[in-house]
Amino acid sequence: MAKEDGPGGPCYKVSLRPMTIVDHLECSYTGTRYEAGKLHNLSGEGWPLLVRYDLAKARESWNREWIADGPRSMWRYAPVLPVKNPANIVSLGEGWSPLVRTPRLAKTLGCEQLWVKDEGINPTGSFKARGLSCAISMCKELGVKKVAIPSAGNAASAMAAYAAAAGMEAHIFMPQDVPQANYIECKSFGAHVTLVNGLISDCGRIVGERKDAEGWFDVSTLKEPYRIEGKKTMGYELAEQMGWTLPDVIFYPTGGGVGMIGMWKAFEEMEQMGWIGSRRPKMIAVQATGCQPIVRAFEQGTERSEFWQNATTVSSGLRVPKPLGDFLVLKAVRQSGGTAIAVTDEESLDWGIELAKQEGMFVAPEGAACVAACQHLLNSGFLKPSEKIVIYNTGAGLKYLEAYATRFPRTALPVDSLSMISPR
Ligand SMILES: *Cc1c(COP(=O)(O)O)cnc(C)c1O
């Protein structure tokens, strides 16, 4: 792909009718307005900021049929993304991931219509690429030179890749037990990596304490407004791939909950532009039993979650003990008539291997956790077999070789014992 063509090739400019129509930013809790086109972290009150667009204008000047001519990446939705100057877009071809029908797995689970949205094909092997492509593009547009992130793994890999592509300095703080893939990727991309003997929450505190003195822009989950915008494209894409309809049920592996918040926002935006109706899928937040703050808050009927002590799970993307946007996740789950459910790591790995065997897709344990959760909710009767179900696989199984390796101990046999003809 020639750089001059822009991301996604020559069609790119077509999808930029009209240019982005960002109106303002808004505190997700109080509704206070903030000016667009400036660097922002949290709102003054300490809550995540959301980007608001002039959707009435979009409704008049943009047609969903034009999107088909757009680039085959998430930038096909550029008019509802925040970047003003297309030259600032930092793209590695993220998004436009396949929505794969999985009939054998459906049969095993006892349902009729099941799809897996496979985010494992994204650059750096996870859907974090969507959020970081958008966030790093905005950093470029707003003149940021150094970025920093605390991460449980995949966000760090994605940030390191996009920072490298943008020529920015990247500073990464990760728990020392993150999967090898994340560590090796970040180092390969030339980031400054610090492994911390602690959790992502400890890493976040360190970045918070040092960023001003170091001149870093903090790209932590939900502490800047644009990762949500990138991740919301999963919602636009799903609607487009299903012929501008939505499924009955969405399973989403929930760590920080950014994807859930983003998709919920996308559905609202599409409704305001007249692209879809008011019906929403049941949103199912899936967590691991070793770290389930959202599930506990959902069951206790509270608006916010409490810090989950001693969080452990092989699904590193789900190891977020206190999501900053918990109230937004819980709102989406409740308003949609969905639920929150936790599964064990053993179940996740079992279903990951089952899915691989049956459908030829090797998924992250986070995605596999959704398969396990789906089985529970079909068995309990919460879901009917006739419902249209979409499972988000958020990452590639290849990034979790340590976890899957526990299931396949290696044994080698002596050469002699394998020969058909016995040696003389
Ligand atoms: C980060 C991550 C998650 C959780 O994503 P959120 O949108 O923050 O909830 C799930 N799966 C994988 C593979 C991840 O990397």
Image (spheres, grey):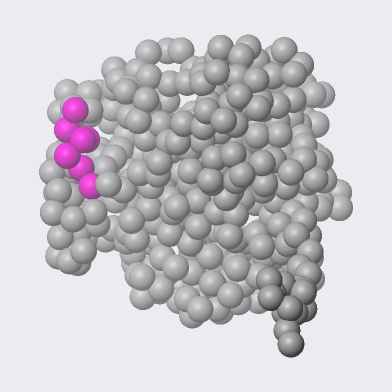
Region in magenta? 65-71
Q: Between 317 and 83, which is closer to the camera in this rendering?
A: 317
Total labels drawn = 0
Residue 419's x, y, as percent?
69, 74
Hey, which residue is sitting farthest bottom in the picture?
424
Lateral position of residue 384 relative to residue 148, left or right: right
Residue 238's x, y, as percent?
40, 31
Residue 322 visible, this angle: no
Residue 79's x, y, as percent?
25, 39
Determine which quarter of the picture holds residue 199.
bottom right
Residue 122 visible, this angle: yes
Q: Is residue 250 above or below residue 409?
A: above
Q: Main secondary structure of the magenta part?
A: helix
Q: Identify the residue at horizontal 56%, vertical 12% (top origin).
A: 386
Hey, which residue is sitting farthest front in the picture?
424
Lateral position of residue 177 relative to residue 1, left or right: right
Q: Identify the residue at horizontal 28%, vertical 27% (top origin).
A: 55
Lateral position of residue 319 relative to residue 15, left or right: right
Q: Quadrant of the N terminus?
A: bottom left
Q: Identify the residue at horizontal 48%, vertical 38% (top origin).
A: 117
Q: Between 186 and 85, which is closer to the camera in this rendering?
A: 186
